[in-house]
Image: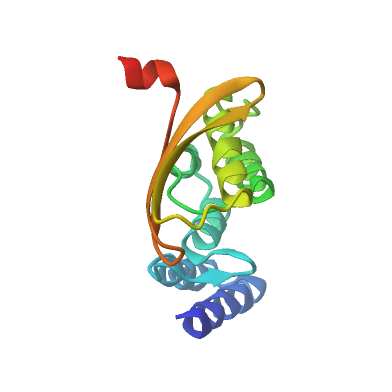
């Protein structure tokens, strides 16, 4: 899939540079249909979506991309999240920041990733910006599911 994704990205860029906007959008759409592939260091689906939103400007397209960013559809670094959040905002004509509670959850996820725990299951409290977040995980290094929640959410 990575080779295929890279080929679709190159084709889309060539078509874009040659002025074939419709062909470029079609190639980017093919790129968005390749799950779990990365191009240019980011998820192929996201790279394609961002390009489509730029080629065929639509506030709905940019808003949908922001919603998917907030839903954590893609595994991103903080820098990637910020870049795509700002790009979607630029295309939508909005410069609002992402919700602070979701940024805290993203920071907790990054902290969890940095403080790797080899146990196949467990739980612990993470402190992010002076606030506790509860982490519960299951699975091995190849496939791990992690739930992060604020204590008050669990108590409810």
Could you tell me if residue 88 is visible in this image?
A: yes
Residue 55 image point, x, y percent: 56, 57
The scheme the figure's colours follow is rainbow
Between 23 and 81, the one lying in front of the other is 81
The quadrant of the picture occupied by the C terminus is top left
Q: Quadrant of residue 26?
A: bottom left
Taking 120 as reference, is 13 left or right? right
Between 73 and 138, the one lying in front of the other is 138
Between 42 and 156, the one lying in front of the other is 156
Most distant residue in the left direction: 156
Residue 94 image point, x, y percent: 61, 29
Q: Which residue is depicted at the point 55% across and 23% down?
A: 132
Number of numbered labels in the structure image: 0
Residue 80 image point, x, y percent: 64, 51
Taking 106 as reference, is 139 left or right? left
Could you tell me if residue 146 is visible in this image?
A: no
Residue 142 image point, x, y percent: 43, 67
The quadrant of the picture occupied by the N terminus is bottom left
Q: Is residue 79 above or below residue 135?
A: below
Q: Which residue is depicted at the point 55% across and 54% down?
A: 50
Q: Which residue is depicted at the point 61% across and 37% down?
A: 107
């Amino acid at each position: 899939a990575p080779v295929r994704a890279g080929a679709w990205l190159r084709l889309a860029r060539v078509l874009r540079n040659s002025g074939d906007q419709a062909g470029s959008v079609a190639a980017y759409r093919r790129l968005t249909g390749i799950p779990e592939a990365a191009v240019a260091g980011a998820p192929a689906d996201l790279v394609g979506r961002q390009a489509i939103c730029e080629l065929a400007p639509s506030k709905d397209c940019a808003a949908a991309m922001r919603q998917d960013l907030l839903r954590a559809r893609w595994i991103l670094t903080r820098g990637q999240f910020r870049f795509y959040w700002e790009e979607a905002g630029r295309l939508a004509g909005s410069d609002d920041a992402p919700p602070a509670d979701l940024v805290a959850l993203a920071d907790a996820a990054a902290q969890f990733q940095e403080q790797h725990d080899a146990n196949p299951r467990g739980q612990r409290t993470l402190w992010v910006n002076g606030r506790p977040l509860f982490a519960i995980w299951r699975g091995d290094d190849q496939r791990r599911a992690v739930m992060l929640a604020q204590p008050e959410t669990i108590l409810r």
